[in-house]
Image: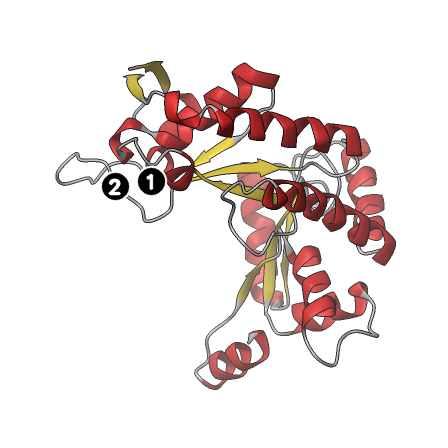
Amino acid sequence: NAREVHELATRHGIKVMLDATRAVENAYFIQQRESGYATKTVADILREFCSYSDGCTMSGKKDALVNIGGWLALNDEQHYAEASNLVVLYEGLHTYGGMAGRDMEAMARGIVESVADDHIRARVGQVEYLGRKLIDAAIPVVRPIGGHAVYLDAKAFYPHLDQEQFPAQALTASLYEDSGVRAMERGIVSAGRDKETGKNHRPALELVRLTIPRRVYTQAHMDLTAESVIEVYDKRLTARGLKLVHEPRYLRFFQARFAPL
């Protein structure tokens, strides 16, 4: 629907900015799932996809295969000039934006390699491999499996825990205790509190994200992760919830501390 969104926005004089952080994975799924794109390369699909925007932001730590950096791309010369002035105030000259030369070179190479069909096929395939193993073991996961992570359904995992007992956070702790696998809570902790009442937001989804870095893990690592999830699932009815013992003012999911109930 990106084409239709851009056409509508253009008619009303509205600029469309693309969050391109997962754009390569999106292009791959277009190739695999949408009619008319099966014979096109991921790079060609990505170019078309980006053409339906007026600019983009990009975190290089995802698709671009690097550990630091990102960029802002703009079609409008006036907006580009303004952004170039602002970057001097906050990051560094527009020629490097606060990044080291080595990191810019790595990102330039990463951009080229990230759109190679063989790479993205293998990258998504590794995530799908983990997802299939968990589905075969009847583990509750979000379907279909995504391109960068497998999401565990913590509500289905721990149906005996109230959401105020932080079931997704409890699941991440159990996985780490069992195998050292580090996962990410995406539920009530991440949702934060209502500014007016101070009560926790209670999102519909209570998930644990198993994010797979690119070119880091082997199939054996995926097998170990699956084995750990299955082991924790087998013991799910004995799991206890958590309580907050330290809650920072902002973005508590990064620095909060918990204790078992």
In this rendering, does residue 160 appear at all? Answer: yes
Q: Secondary structure at mark 1?
A: helix
Where residue 51 appears, x then y in whole percent?
67, 73
Residue at image mark 2: 201
Q: Amino acid at mark 1?
A: Ala
Residue at image mark 1: 191
The answer to whether residue 133 is left or right of residue 155 is right
Q: Nearer the viewer, residue 141 or 124?
A: 141
Q: Amino acid at mark 2?
A: His
Q: Farthest left residue?
A: 197
Where residue 10 appears, x then y in whole percent?
51, 81
Q: Quadrant of residue 211?
A: top right
The color scheme shown is secondary structure
Q: Quadrant of residue 39?
A: bottom right
User: If the image is split into quadrants, where does the N terminus sit?
Assistant: bottom right
Q: Residues within 10 Å of mark 2 (few under 14, many from 20)?
A: some
Where residue 24 appears, x then y in whole percent?
71, 57
